[in-house]
Amino acid sequence: MFNVLSSGGPITKKVIKKVCILGDPGVGKTSVINRYVKNVFSPDYLSTIGANVSTKELTLEGTHLIMSIWDIAGQQTSRSLSASHYNGSGGAVFVYDLTSQPSFDGLIQWEYQIKKVLKDVPHIFIANKTDLAEGMTIPETRLPVAHKVKPNFFMVSAKTGEGLAAAFDYLGKQMLKSA
């Protein structure tokens, strides 16, 4: 434990947590990470192979949290390999494309996959691409039933950055509770 003064007050401890980002191909997992970590967005789609790791540091409730964010490939052929990437995770982010029903349906499989390895991990659901859904009527089937009452559901845009800080701050606080 160490004490350091920051602009937000004294930091009492430092915690490193691994976070897995999961979802079908093309939902914007890499874009979500790039916007959140580097504040950049590219409209070009490049499929992730295996896993890419990024780091984000933030201060939450007096704790210096370092998130090791694992961008896990979404292809069906990679799912069995992905289980080894889940080990040691302190949190999970399930991402789907708000404009794609199949990507929402895929969340059930992603949640099942991670729960086989990690029984009870803090997690959030991210409905990405709100910028594309503007003016669109979103069927209730594309929103988790509990989205109106559960605080772990976020509508975001990797393109504009809308909602990302709130989503990851929430996840960070949940992970710190279990630290």
Image (spheres, rainbow, N blue to C red):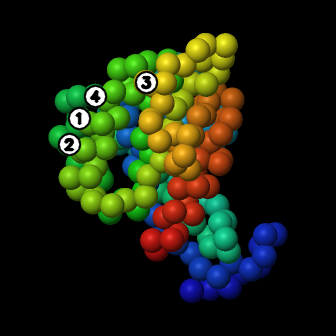
Earlier sequence position, callout 2 versus callout 4: 4
Kind of residue at badge 2: Leu
Q: Can the viewer see residue 124 in this picture?
A: yes
Q: 103 and 67: which one is in front? A: 103
Q: Which residue is mark 4?
A: 75
- Are dots 2 and 1 in contact, CB under 8 Å? yes
Q: CA distance from mark 2 to mark 4?
A: 10 Å
Q: In the image as oriented, which residue stretches furthest toward the top? A: 136
Q: At 53% from the left edge and 55% from the top edge, which residue is drawn?
A: 171
- Are dots 4 and 1 in contact, CB under 8 Å? yes
Earlier sequence position, callout 3 versus callout 2: 2
Image spot of residue 119 (x, y percent):
27, 60
Q: Which residue is mark 1?
A: 78
Label 3 residue SS: helix
Q: Which residue is mark 2?
A: 81
Residue 23 figure quarter:
top left
Q: Residues within 10 Å of mark 2 (few under 14, many from 20)?
A: some
Kind of residue at badge 4: Gln
Q: CA distance from mark 3 to mark 2?
A: 30 Å
Earlier sequence position, callout 4 versus callout 3: 4
